[in-house]
Image (cartoon, rainbow, N blue to C red):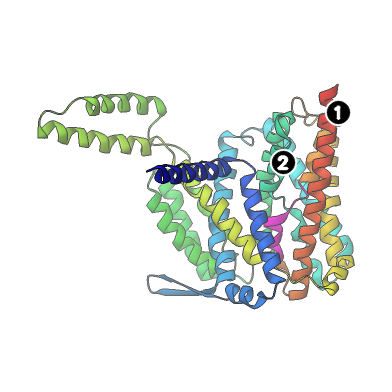
Amino acid sequence: MTKYRQSRTFVDVLQSSFNEFFQRSTSTGVTILVFAAIALLWTNSPFHSLYEALLHQPVEIVVAQLRLNFTLEHFVNDGLMVLFFLVVGLEIKREMLVGELSSRQKALLPMIAAAMGMVAPAAVYLLFNSGTDAARGWGVPVATDIAYALGILALLGNRVPLGLKVFLAALAIVDDLLAVLVIALFYSGGLNVQMLLFAGIITGVLILGNRLRIGSVWFYGILGVALWVTVLFSGIHATIAGVVLAMCIPADSRIDRISFFTKSRDLLGKISKRAISDEEEGAQLDAIHWLEKMCEYVQSPLHRIESGLGKTVSFGIMPLFALVNAGVVIDPALISSLASPVSLGIILGLFIGKQLGITAAVWATVKLGITRLPNGVSMVQMYGVSLLCGIGFTMALFVAHLAFIDPRHLDIAKLSIIVGSIISAVVGSLVLRSTLAREQRT
């Protein structure tokens, strides 16, 4: 009996530790980093052939009469990452409706900063690669990895002003939106007009469902799969289907919270009474059923889907994406290639381009009176955040796979993304730690 209790205590402690880990804001970044490290170690180990075999493992998807054949790497990048982009799209929509992008005053500073924070890295990259076959990779250093950037801010503790966190989150949302547009406009293949037409029809049905306030998650899920298939064959990158679907999902609940409270209180009153007859017990079961329905109706489809997919994407899909995309064989030739135009364009685009674009945009718009700094935030702190925006891991790897056909260029890009992101993270955290400590002393 004592051993059983000890065993249960150990299990409870372990479960509590896992729950605490998954609730932390830094957990997603840590998990992705661990899987990226596994990919690098695995690729450079004697078991490299097993890693390659994993990437080329066949995956077959059957949709009605349609059979889709992928390798595991292809399925993760063109299939599972659709869910990542769906969650990104839902976050963008939520922020535009009720969050930090819901008004001009709130949105202007992060919007301008995000736009310039993408233009400057692209310009730095093209400075080294313009006119070459590698020029297509200009989109690699333009996007920020929000999980790592916010994770580092969280590690700095309560000293970080709330306005700085809000600014970074809003900037990252706009950054994600612009990155999606870059992928759709510049990294899609030849267009299949017939499939685009089918995708347009499905999107029209989704919009109609939104207007009719259809709240069924199944409705959007089934049509979302159909949209993914048509976009997959349309020439536009398949992940764009996730963002389109997100924009069509209703953000309004079927009942408001006051009605939910009133009706739920009545239902709980029926459930709490002691049932004397079978008829009363049946009425209580009906009340429990309707209480469950009320809980569903008070949540918007947007919130239910975002909440339902959040953990799966953060701790399932994104780590798997890192595992299948971060593997690169690091040899002396690859290390020497860090001085190549492709590598310099990516590393300096992330580290120099991001900080120049964002800092210049913030400084200029504040000086001209177009925007103002968030409350309690200094210009030096904004500079530190601009450095953190040079962490471009997830989206940068994704764009690299779309941009580079030459495997050597892709390997150089992967290593350069890691190097540029590490430099940005270290320097950004040091700048912020220094300025926060100095301001705390004063």
Q: Amino acid at mark 1?
A: Arg
- The quadrant where residue 335 appears: bottom right
Q: Are marks 1 and 2 in contact (CB under 8 Å)?
A: no
> To which residue does mark 1 refer?
438
Q: Position of residue 415 (x, y in %)?
A: 78, 64
Q: Is the residue marked by circle 2 packed among few (<14), some (14-19), or many (20+) residues within 10 Å?
A: many
Quadrant location of the N terminus in the rendered image? top left
Residue furthest to the front: 2
SS for callout 2: helix
- The quadrant where residue 97 appears: top right
- Image: 49 above or below 95: below
Tell me how far mark 1 sits from mark 2, CA to CA. 29 Å
Q: Residue at x 38, y 32 (%)?
A: 255
Q: Residue at x 72, y 50 (%)?
A: 144
- Image: 66 above or below 251: below
Give residue 111's mark: 2
Q: Nearer the viewer, residue 29 or 357?
A: 29
Q: How many marks?
A: 2
In the image, taking residue 218 as reference, residue 324 lies left or right, namely right
Q: Find out whether residue 331 is within the magenta segment.
A: no
* Secondary structure mostly taken by the magenta-highlighted segment of the chain: helix
In the image, taking residue 321 as reference, residue 251 lies left or right, namely left
Image: magenta residue range = 389-402
Q: Position of residue 235 (x, y in %)?
A: 59, 69
Q: Amino acid at mark 2?
A: Met
Nearest to viewer (mark 1 / mark 2): 1
Give residue 123's mark: none
In the image, taking residue 134 as reference, residue 88 lies left or right, namely left
Q: Position of residue 261 (x, y in %)?
A: 36, 25
Q: Position of residue 244 (x, y in %)?
A: 54, 54
Q: Residue at x 62, y 48 (%)?
A: 28
